[in-house]
Image (tube, rainbow, N blue to C red):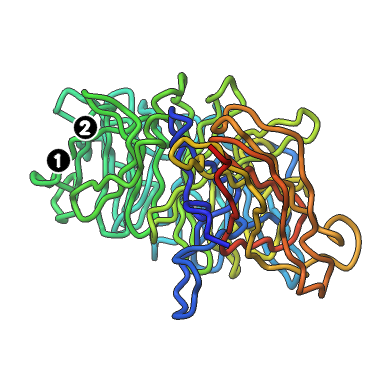
Amino acid sequence: MPRYPGFIGEAYPSSSYQERAILENFFLEKNESDGAPTPFGLRPTPGLILRASVSQAPIRGTYAGDGQAYFLAGFAFYELLLDGLTWTPTLRGTVVSDGSPGTIAANGVGDQLGITSGGVFYCYDRTTHALVVAGVPGTVATMGGSLNGRFYYLEARSGTVYSSSLYNGLTWDPSHYLQSTAGDPWITLAVTPDGFIRLFGPLTGEILVDQGNPGFPCVTVQEGRIPFGILAPYAFAVDTSISWVTRSAKGRGQVVRAQGYAPNRISNHGIEHTIQSYGAVDDALAFSYQSEGHPTAVFTFPAAEDGLGRTWAVDEATGKWHGRSFWNVATGVAQAYRPAYAMEAFGATLVGDRVTGSIYELTPASFTDVGGALIRHVRQPAPLTLERRRYVVDSFELSMDVGVGLISGQGSDPQAMLRISRDGGKSFGGPHWTTLGAQGEYRTRVLWNQLGNCRSFVPQLVITDPVPARVTDATITIRPEAA
């Protein structure tokens, strides 16, 4: 059977039905084997395992380093301890909370953490566990970071960055500051592993580098002025570099990634069209993680689509996009992805729930979502046409891992559901079910026959069973109808 063109592909949320493609809770993995039948395959996005939960909510920030892990939950600051297989959140103090994200950073050999929450800068001693208010009196600490042993925080209302003493977050000189002068006050501060402090206003950005100057130690890199601002204060993700959702004097909604000083576009027109269609975006959030060689940036817009929210993710190794969502069984609708903060701790990727006070491990070994909910994996390619002629679809088949059913319970007889659109994706018919094979049934064929006739065929694949449903290819047999 001939291959279905474009079935294995990325998300492209176009305004045109002729281009629209959905990839939800699947992501594209490049096939690096010499014998791979296709360049890419579809893999389920990592699932979640609950590791800790506290009554305060939501999770508002995370940090891990030197074998320790910390997080903000509501008004509380916790250290997360691991003893054998037991995960224990330990309260280390309380902070002011305005519901916005907080930040946590370390100053290295100073053995301190700098925390911003509710407009207040706190200094935490990791040896004595003392948590005290610090910073410059009378200022509002919007967000912070650390570079070369000093804490920095941004006061967004005035576009001013303050610096602490070296290795001492308790000591701040009110004269050690730098203020934006470009008429575009900074609203975002991010310290990146390349040794830069990146500052963004609503329309432009700037880069600071530490030159060890007396007073405020950093200077502006003249050639590092960025022609893009940021869509929302926390709409950025930091890994080896920084990716962010832009705003400029000419528009909004591109996603770019810094390479040195220069920002490079990593979004496609479909993603950009969709982001531009959102109304309120000031609450946009982003985080990044790496799993099995996939460095992934995740962007969530909680207020989009009438409050249901929307999440888009990009594998920064391939540049391919997919959607993520939480399937609300009670309402039967998809909502924005719940994880919003990430840290690497105790050999695991830990993420914080932006709704509750739960910390989860994000892992490809799990196939369930927050609260043990099932994950709804969806692939819908662009329409298939045959020079606008009517044709008959005799069969549609997936090449994928089969015989991967669980021993018992949900997933012991895993199923794939196919819905068909015959009008280019505008409407879909009822479900057609087929098995993925119980455990060990490796000869199972994921096949649908006699799918009718049309001029524009769109298959929509849905898998919800908690099994490793990897798809490597799709084939289709069609024949033109007699003229």
Residue 335 placement, left or right of 228: right
Examine the rendered structure and indicate whether residue 293 appears above or below residue 245: below
Residue 212 placement, left or right of 57: left
Pointer 1 or 2: first along the chain: 2
Q: Dot 2, crowdedness within 10 Å: few (<14), some or many (≥20)?
A: many
Which residue is disc 1 drawn over?
Answer: 225
Residue 71 placement, left or right of 136: right
Which element is circle 2 on? loop
Which element is circle 1 on? loop
Amino acid type, callout 2 = Thr
Amino acid type, callout 1 = Arg
**Quadrant of residue 268 in the image?**
top left
**As rendered, which of 262 and 42 lies closer to the eye?**
42
Residue lying at the far left of the rendered structure: 222
Residue lying at the far front of the rendered structure: 483
**As rendered, which of 347 and 469 lies closer to the eye?**
469
* x, y percent for residue 331: 77, 28
- Residue 96 visible in the current orientation: no
Point 63% across, 43% down: residue: 460
- Residue 5 visible in the current orientation: yes
**As rendered, which of 133 and 342 lies closer to the eye?**
342
Which residue is disc 2 drawn over?
Answer: 204
Examine the rendered structure and indicate whether residue 158 appears above or below residue 6: above
Q: Alpha carbon of mark 1 to alpha carbon of mark 2: how far?
A: 8 Å
Tell me, yes or no, whether the two marked residues, 1 and 2, touch with CB atoms within 8 Å.
Answer: yes
The N terminus lies in which quarter of the figure? Answer: bottom right
Point 67% across, 32% down: residue: 428
